Amino acid sequence: MSDEMMKMPKFSDIKYARPSIEEFRECAMSTRLKLMTARDPEVVETAIMAFQREMSAFDTAYTICMIRHDLDTADTFFNDEMDFFDENYPVVSDLSAGVYSALLHSEIRPQLEERFGTMIFRKTQNQRDIVSSEVLDELAEESTLESEYSQILSEADIFFKGKHHTISTMTPFLESTDRDMRIKAHKAVSDYYASQKPKFDEIYDKMVKIRTEIAKKLGYENFVQLGYKRMERYDYNEEMVQAFRDNIVKYIVPITSEIRRLQKNRLGVEKLMYYDLPCLFVHGNPKPMIPQEEYFATASKMFGQMFDKDPSFFQVLGEHDFMDLFSRQNKATGGYCASLLDYGIPFILMNANSTSDDIATMVHESGHAYAALRSIDSSQFIECLSPTLEACEIHSTAMEYLSYPYMDMFFGAHAPAYREQHMTLALLFLPYGCLVDEYQHVVYKNPDMTPAERHAAWRELEKKYQPDIDYGDDAFYEEGGAWMKKEHIFTSPFYYIDYCLAQICALQIWDISQKNRKKAMTIYDHLCTEGGTKTLIELVEDAGLESPFSLNVIKKLAYQVCDYLNL
Ligand code: ZN
């Protein structure tokens, strides 16, 4: 553990202050001027580093604000502060685009590329392709719609079995071994979404239209191309992604049908219905043997053993309040890890609810946190500390696989069932992730579709990727409403395939770890330490893995996984 981390502040002691847009603007303007006139790389470096500090401060303030808002969505102060960032983030992006544009056009660019590496230049060019001052109003509108959607979701109040629930705290009932309970719980969730359907349809329709408008103003044919640029896809394109999805349909979908057939037999039901799907085992999905209060101590110990370090990074983060693990009312749903750049410290937010998912999520977010800590010194540019999102998801997903041998600490005798469940869910996820991805391609290539047409398109695609799903008489799902449950579709367009690409890379690390644990740990650490200094395929191949787009990798892994699961 480094000295800095031992001296680190507590999250609760960190002061939040709204950053000054005027100061930011001044710094951006003067940096831009220096970059345009400087002939000395030294001068450029000094100027750009000063601007980097300003950006880091702005980003840190935003992250603190977002976390405090997410920890208590009813807090009006941070709600207002989030509005400030919604409004001003595009302004700041535009100002930094101006600075980087000067860097891009510098007369001494070759010397600068030698000094800084090419990644920052590639990122800068990409940034220029996705923002311009002409679309600032539309970007602010898009951002407001996203906040509106998230706000509705965080206020979701599902009354079930005499109690108020969030979407997240409904999960144990959705997975229940009692079929009647499952049916009622699924009905309650479906009723909630059905009640919100007009609102969600309206928000999404506006989102599709505004995103399309932004894309057109920036000179793209539709939002698909802009979406790819926003996701920073430097070394793969739409055709490669389509070929990837086709491979999933070819090699993974048949395995998922077999999994569902076995599940149906195990549960002893005549027909496997959609409400049966989350219950994989007749005695229920393995639950942690330890109470939530012990998660932290146990995970601290596990990471200590895994990385041979005491105290573990996880323990140090937790002891300084850089995590909030448990679900409660008025806390944002989901889970994430966000870095406070000025401090070089990641924060983990999640919503534990006593299901097996708790542990996988905790390990997943810890993978992001570990990578954030390992890559602190990988680049002098904050933009290059963290890689593009698919590569980030390798850090987290591979950590889930690398934690397999330690799962006895959480699940005791049920650890094998946990591993079986985890691997099964990973397989089931791949077609679902591709479904979410293809759906968005359809939506953004046909921006004038009506909400009803979008629902119909989803239902058609479901039949290709999830042929075994049976919604019975649930009208909301049967009419194609299930996509509304996926936050990413609203707030992070085209993000979802990243999880699938990452899964294929992480599964390769799992496969290696089965034969050579040390080698797998070395590959993992190498990937994390590289941060965002390279593109996805470069990072993966440098670490000694195959590109997820390579012809045989999915087929090969499908074989290994079937063997592991005795399918
Ligand atoms: Zn993640």
Image (tube, rainbow, N blue to C red):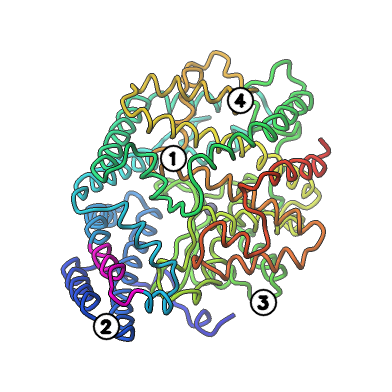
Q: Nearer the viewer, mark 2 or mark 1?
A: 2
* SS assignment at label 3: loop
Tag 2–tag 1 contact (CB < 8 Å): no
Taking the spot 67% from the left edge, 44% from the top edge, the residue there is 551
Q: In the rendered structure, which disc, 4 or 2, sits on the residue that comes first in sequence?
A: 2
Tag 1–tag 4 contact (CB < 8 Å): no
Tag 4–tag 2 contact (CB < 8 Å): no
Q: In the rendered structure, which disc, 1 or 4, sits on the residue that comes first in sequence?
A: 4
Q: Nearer the viewer, mark 1 or mark 4?
A: 1
What residue sits right under mark 4 in the picture?
A: 275
Q: Which portion, as a residue range, is magenta?
A: 95-109
Q: Nearer the viewer, mark 4 or mark 2?
A: 2
Magenta stretch contains residue 485: no
Residue 496 placement (x, y as % from top left): 50, 43
Image vertical order of residue 264 relative to residue 538, above or below: above
Query: What is the CA distance from the residue labelled 4 to the residue labelled 2?
Result: 66 Å
What amino acid type is highlighted by mark number 4?
Answer: Tyr
